[in-house]
Image (cartoon, grey):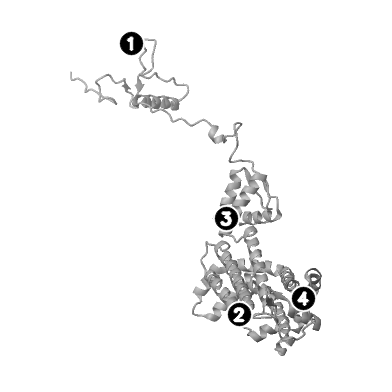
Amino acid sequence: MDTIASLFSFITTPVSWVIVQFHTVYGKIFGPDTGWAWGLSIVSLVILIRICLIPLFVKQIKSTRAMQTLQPEMKKIQERYKNDKQRQSEEMMKLYKETGTNPLSSCLPILAQSPFFFALYHVLNGIATGDTIGVINESLLASARKAHIFGAPLAAKFKDGSATVQALGATVTDVRVVTAVMIVMMSASQFYTQRQLMTKNVDTTVKTPFMQQQKMLMYVFPVMFAVFGINFPVGVLVYWLTTNVWTMGQQMYVIHNNPTPGSKAQAAYLERLTKHVTNHGKARKRSERTIIKAIVAKGRDRNEFERKFINGLNKAGLAAQADGSVIQSDSQAAVQTEDGSPASAAAPKRQQPKRQSKSQRQSGAASVGSKAAGDDQPSEPTSLSKSDEPEDAKPAAPAKKQPGGGTRSKAQSGQRKGPQRPKSPSKK
C-alpha cells in the first residue's frame, strides 16, 4: 500500500491540501470534528474538480456526436474489409483523421478524474489505518477519525469487521446500512444518467452498433458500482455519489438546451424554440442563434424535426438567416385581416363555371373560328341569336370560287354538303 501511495504522491498532496482548506472553512461553521465539516469538504472537492473538467466535458460531447455521425461510414468500412483487419484499422484511422475525431475523447472526463479518485481513496485509507498522508498531520488525522456521516465513519467500509469498526467508534450495523444506501443511490444515479442519454439524446434515425454498446453500458456500469462500492470507504462513496449526481444534472442541462440532432430531445427543444421565437419575433439568446445557424447551414440535409422548425417559422411570417438571426419574412404565409381571420379565409371562393349545352358550345366554337379568320371579316350571326330582319330579307352570301374555276353554292336543306359532282352535258 505504501508503494501505491508513493506512486500517487504527486496528486495525493494537492488533494489532501484542498480538503484541509475546505475543512478549515466548514469547521468554523459546523465544528472541526463533525461529519458535516469533513463530508462537505469532500463534496466541495468534487465540485471544484468537475468545474475544472467542464472544458473536457464539452469536448466529450462534441466527440460523442461526431462518433454518432460517423457510425454509418464505420459500418461500411467494417463490412467492406471484414476479412482484412489491418486494412480495416487503416481505413478507420484515415476516417478519424479526415473528420478530426478521436474515439478516446469521450473518455477524457473519466480518465482525468481517475487520479483524483485514487488520491482521495489513499487519503481516506490513511485515515482508516491511522497514517498521515499529504498535508494531513496528527491533529487532523484524529479529527477525521472522529467524523461520522449518519453514524458511519468516513474511513469505514461495508466489509469491515466489528473490531475495525469499533476502533473507529461505530457499529457494524450503522456502517453497512449507510454504505448500502449510498451504493444503491450511486448505482441508481448512474443508471438514470445513462438511460436518459439513450432514451432522449440519441439519434433515432441511425441504427448502429454504437447504440447497442451504450445500451449495454447502461446496465453494466451500475453493477460495477455495486460490486466495487462494498470495498470503498464512506468518504469515497460520498465523493462518487456527488460526482454521479453532478454528471446527471450536467447531462440533463445538455439534453434540455443542446440536444443531439435527430433525437427526441431535439424535437422537444425545437418545439419550445418555435414558440419562443414566434412570440418574440426573434432569437434572443446566443445559444438559440447558434442552433438556428447550424440548422440553416444544413440546407437539404436537415432532419424531420429541423424541417418542421423552419416551416413553423415560415407559417408565422418569419425567416431564419445564415447568421442565426430571425427576421420578418417579405412573403408572409399567414397574413391577418382586420377581424383577425387569415387572409385565405376572407378571400372569395372560386366559383365553378356553369355547364354549357351542346348548342352553346358549338356557337362558341363558331365565334372563335370567325375571330381566327380575321378581325376585318364580320362574324355571321348564329342560329340562337335574335335578328330584327326577316330571314328572307337577308342578302345571300356570295358564292365562293373553287380552285377549278367553278362555284359552290350554300347547301340547301335535304342536299348533301360538300362539293357536288358536275352534271353530265346533254347530248344534242
Q: CA distance from mark 1 to mark 2?
A: 120 Å
The residue labelled by disc 4 is 33
**Which residue type does callout 2 highlight?**
Phe
**Which residue type does callout 1 highlight?**
Asp
Q: Is residue 196 above or below residue 131?
A: above
Q: CA distance from mark 3 to mark 4?
A: 51 Å
Write the residue at 60% across / 67% down: 193
Residue 402 in sight here: no
The residue labelled by disc 2 is 228
Q: Nearer the viewer, residue 195 or 276?
A: 195
* Residue 45 pos. (x, y %): 74, 72
Q: Secondary structure at mark 2?
A: helix
Q: Secondary structure at mark 3?
A: helix
**Which residue type does callout 4 highlight?**
Asp
Q: CA distance from mark 2 to mark 4?
A: 28 Å
Number of callouts: 4
Q: Mark 2 or mark 3, which is nearer the start of the sequence? A: 2
Q: Residue furthest left?
A: 428
Q: Are marks 4 and 1 in contact (CB under 8 Å)?
A: no
Query: Nearer the observer, disc 3 or disc 1?
Result: 3
Disc number placed over residue 185 in the picture, else none: none
Q: CA distance from mark 4 to mark 1?
A: 133 Å
Q: Are marks 1 and 2 in contact (CB under 8 Å)?
A: no
Query: Nearer the observer, disc 3 or disc 4?
Result: 4
| Label 3 environment density (alpha carbons within 10 Å; few <14, some 14–19, many ≥20) | many
